[in-house]
Image (tube, helix red, strand yellow):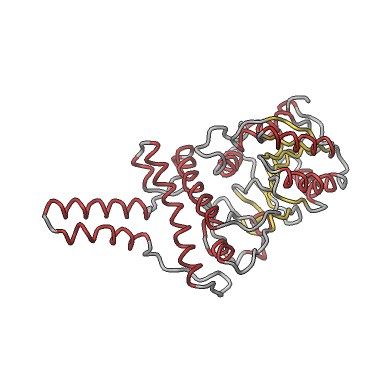
């Protein structure tokens, strides 16, 4: 294949990273193959994979069966996408996660948006439909935990965005290579690289626009509570990555973990210095109280899951601050202990007219 940096031909190159899940890749390729057939321009599908050998063989065979290109790639997701982009032949790079199922018009709608903009945009964001998941505790927690839910509907609710999740986003190949693609050195395997790319595209005068009809369906099973903790903790670490790359954008934020640990250590120190055991014993309780001090939120639709779900969701959300705290310590930078990247600003986002009365929460 030719280098994507020399792309001139109009068409769509679909790029997806994969790791150790042939079943997901099989469903992805079947649906994406159907979506590619609705396009009046050349298309290709590139799977960039770093699975263990046995599963890599399965995924390669699936690619062969669906006329997709199999590319061996690195571990980091952003680096995988870059490798696929360098192999791509066409003018639009469509990044879709391998656990997502394309709707029939997905590829055609992404290409239509790029054609109508005639080079005036950097990327197109499409929405991602996520299954509700049911009434079990993990599903209730997933609905309620603010940091566990990426803004998958922004592509449907916004005309202009600064960034969008790369579960479903297409980028002009020319603009992508002009800004250097995805950062290949994030602090986590994945997390934050989609925000970083959107910020750089917007700063270069190549905005991200939404297309409500360019939709995919998220095809995985509901997450476990353990996986929610791990994901939100990773998002917290990614926040440090973003504030390191875009230090001028960092906003003051009282990280509850930083405050709690500081208060706890101070209390212990005072207790030991004064010989007052009560202060020393109370310090951990003070720390816990600070971690849980934020009011339990009602759901946006006015309903409420059970109290256990609300309490667990609060702890899941707190793992974002724990991730930020741990990554800041790992980086040896005290200034990173207190702060937050501004994921949503009125300056860089514009809602579609019917969405103006509603306020979207930024992710983390």
Given residues 158 and 310, the one toward you in this image is 310
| Screen quadrant of the N terminus | top right
Given residues 204 and 282, the one toward you in this image is 282
The percent coordinates of residue 169 (x first, y second) are: 69, 46
Residue shown at the point (28%, 58%) measured from the top left:
284
Given residues 112 and 231, the one toward you in this image is 231
Residue shown at the point (74%, 46%) measured from the top left:
23
The percent coordinates of residue 154 (x first, y second) are: 64, 56
Q: Please give left or right for residue 114 compared with residue 309 in the image.
A: right
Residue shown at the point (47%, 57%) measured from the top left:
317
Q: Please give left or right for residue 344 compared with residue 248 in the image.
A: right
On screen, residue 133 above or below 49: below
The percent coordinates of residue 329 (x first, y second) are: 37, 40
Q: Please give left or right for residue 165 compared with residue 35 in the image.
A: left
Residue shown at the point (56%, 41%) measured from the top left:
196
Q: Quadrant of residue 172?
A: top right
> Which residue reaches farthest bottom?
303
Q: Quadrant of residue 171?
A: top right
On screen, residue 355 above or below 14: below
> Which residue reaches farthest left?
274
Count up the numbered dots.
0
């Amino acid at each position: 294949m030719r280098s994507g940096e020399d792309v001139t031909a109009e068409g769509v190159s679909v790029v997806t990273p994969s790791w150790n899940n042939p079943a997901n890749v099989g469903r992805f390729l079947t649906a994406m193959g159907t979506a590619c057939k609705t396009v009046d321009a050349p298309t290709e599908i590139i799977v960039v994979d770093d699975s263990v050998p046995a599963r890599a063989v399965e995924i390669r065979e699936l690619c062969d069966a669906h006329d997709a290109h199999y590319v061996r790639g690195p571990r980091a997701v952003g680096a995988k996408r870059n490798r696929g982009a360098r192999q791509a032949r066409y003018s639009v790079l469509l990044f879709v996660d391998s656990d997502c199922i394309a709707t029939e018009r997905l590829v055609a709608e992404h290409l239509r948006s790029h054609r109508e903009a005639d080079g005036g945009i950097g990327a197109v964001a499409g929405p991602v439909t996520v299954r509700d998941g049911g009434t079990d505790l993990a599903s209730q927690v997933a609905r309620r935990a603010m940091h566990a839910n990426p803004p998958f509907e922004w592509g449907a609710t916004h005309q202009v965005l600064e960034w969008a999740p790369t579960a479903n986003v297409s980028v002009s190949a020319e603009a992508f290579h002009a800004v250097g693609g995805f950062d290949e050195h994030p602090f986590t395997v994945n997390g934050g690289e989609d925000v970083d790319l959107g910020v750089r595209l917007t700063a270069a005068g190549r905005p991200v626009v939404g297309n409500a009809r360019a939709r995919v369906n998220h095809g995985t099973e509901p997450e476990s509570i353990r996986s929610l903790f791990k994901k939100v903790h990773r998002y917290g670490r990614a926040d440090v990555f973003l504030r390191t790359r875009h230090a001028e954008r960092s906003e003051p934020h009282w990280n509850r973990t930083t405050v709690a640990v500081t208060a706890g250590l101070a209390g212990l120190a005072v207790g030991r210095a004064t010989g007052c055991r009560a202060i020393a014993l109370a310090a951990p309780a003070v720390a816990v109280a600070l971690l849980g001090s934020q009011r339990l939120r009602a759901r946006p639709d006015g309903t409420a899951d059970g109290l256990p779900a609300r309490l667990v969701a609060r702890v899941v959300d707190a793992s974002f601050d724990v991730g930020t705290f741990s990554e800041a310590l790992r980086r040896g930078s005290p200034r990173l202990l207190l702060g937050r990247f501004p994921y949503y600003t009125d300056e860089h986002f514009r809602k579609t007219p019917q969405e103006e009365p509603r306020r979207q929460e930024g992710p983390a």
